[in-house]
Image (cartoon, helix red, strand yellow):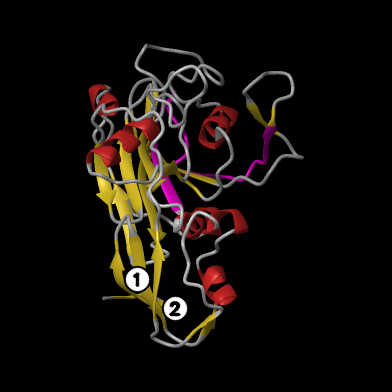
């Protein structure tokens, strides 16, 4: 049995969820606990009751679903439990389908789960750019996804990146709060603009070479191209950034989502997911990436 904040979990797999609330609950209160929308509720089989007693066991069944377009290319799994899966995405791979290719990280994750007889399609909880490498978190079950969506949307979900920027970055540490907006004059590009959305980026210089710098970057907002825009705005664009700085070689954008820290919304445990430095960065001669303590 697993003790959670508002309930106790007795059993959980891809077929059913057996749990009990820690006090008397109405059906509406129980649904609100899991933040289920009316659309999501229709996917699951609930007991035909309007209220539940303290410690009364409740069983919710999870009907199997069709897994769309699975790809069986192997993936690197960093963490997995009954609700989520964290994967190390290589560069030059889309997280979601774009209408032109079906070989995406999400389809590879679905292929991996299908081989384990998991009967629910995975959903990416966030995304990183096509050429960016690193951690991507997936929901394995629609029932629990709203809890993780809320966690990621909160300011208690921290991400830390590594990148290599052009030039010698002059600051030991630099915090950027420049607002970011869409560039109306360039498709798929963002700009710093006074009327843009709030964006918080903290940059720490780890190491420098003759014409480049290894940077550790923490973000507490998730604006499109946020790190790329802020680095370029400071005058130190990320190497191989085709939009904000220019391509230097064919190895892809030198940006890695290296660390994610958050409180697991179901198990209530602190999650600290961390990757080794991207091999592309090591090939560029950089080594200082051991410290990954996130500033909060």
Q: Is residue 73 visible?
A: yes
Report the side of 274 relative to 211 (left or right). Answer: left
Q: Which residue is mark 1?
A: 18
As helix, strand or loop, the secondary structure at mark 2 comes to loop
Q: Is residue 162 magenta?
A: yes
Other residues around mark 1 within 10 Å, as few (<14) / some (14–19) / many (≥20): some
Q: Which x, y percent locates residue 44? A: 47, 58
Q: Quadrant location of the N terminus?
A: bottom left
Image point (39%, 34%), residue name: 106
Q: Is residue 202 magenta?
A: no
Q: In this orientation, which residue lies closer to the viewer: 23 or 62?
A: 62
> Bounds of the magenta span?
158-181
Q: Are marks 1 and 2 in contact (CB under 8 Å)?
A: no
Image point (59%, 53%), residue name: 39
Q: In this orientation, which residue lies closer to the viewer: 222 or 289?
A: 222
Report the side of 281 relative to 93 (left or right). Answer: left
Q: Which residue is mark 2?
A: 6
Examine the rendered structure and indicate whether residue 87 appears above or below residue 262: above
Report the side of 235 relative to 103 (left or right). Answer: right
Q: Which x, y percent locates residue 87? A: 31, 40
Image point (59%, 58%), residue name: 37
Q: How many marks?
A: 2
Chief SS of the magenta region? strand
């Amino acid at each position: 049995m697993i003790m959670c904040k508002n309930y106790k979990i007795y059993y959980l797999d891809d077929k059913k969820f057996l749990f009990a609330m820690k006090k008397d609950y109405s059906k509406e209160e129980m649904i609100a606990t899991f933040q289920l929308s009316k659309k999501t509720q229709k996917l699951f089989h609930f007991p035909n009751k309007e209220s539940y007693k303290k410690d009364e066991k409740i069983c919710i069944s999870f009907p199997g679903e069709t897994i769309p377009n699975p790809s069986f290319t192997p993936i690197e799994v960093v963490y997995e439990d009954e609700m989520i899966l964290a994967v190390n995405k290589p560069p030059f791979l889309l997280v979601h389908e774009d209408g032109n290719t079906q070989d995406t990280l999400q389809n590879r994750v679905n292929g991996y789960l299908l081989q384990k007889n998991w009967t629910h399609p995975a959903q990416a909880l966030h995304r990183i750019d096509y050429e960016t490498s690193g951690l991507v978190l997936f929901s394995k079950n629609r029932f629990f996804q709203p809890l993780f969506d809320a966690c990621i949307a909160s300011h208690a979900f921290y991400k830390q990146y590594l990148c290599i920027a052009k030039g010698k970055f002059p600051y030991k540490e630099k915090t950027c709060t420049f607002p970011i907006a869409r560039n109306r004059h360039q498709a798929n590009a963002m700009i710093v603009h006074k009327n843009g959305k709030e964006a918080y980026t903290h940059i720490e210089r780890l190491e420098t070479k003759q014409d480049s710098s290894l940077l550790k970057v923490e973000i507490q907002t998730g604006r499109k191209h946020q790190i790329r825009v802020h680095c370029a705005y400071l005058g130190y664009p990320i190497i191989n950034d085709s939009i904000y700085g220019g391509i230097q070689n064919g190895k892809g954008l030198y940006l890695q989502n290296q660390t994610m820290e958050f409180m697991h919304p179901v198990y209530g445990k602190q999650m600290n997911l961390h990757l080794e430095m991207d091999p592309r960065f090591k090939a560029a001669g950089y080594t200082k990436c051991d410290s990954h303590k996130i500033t909060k």
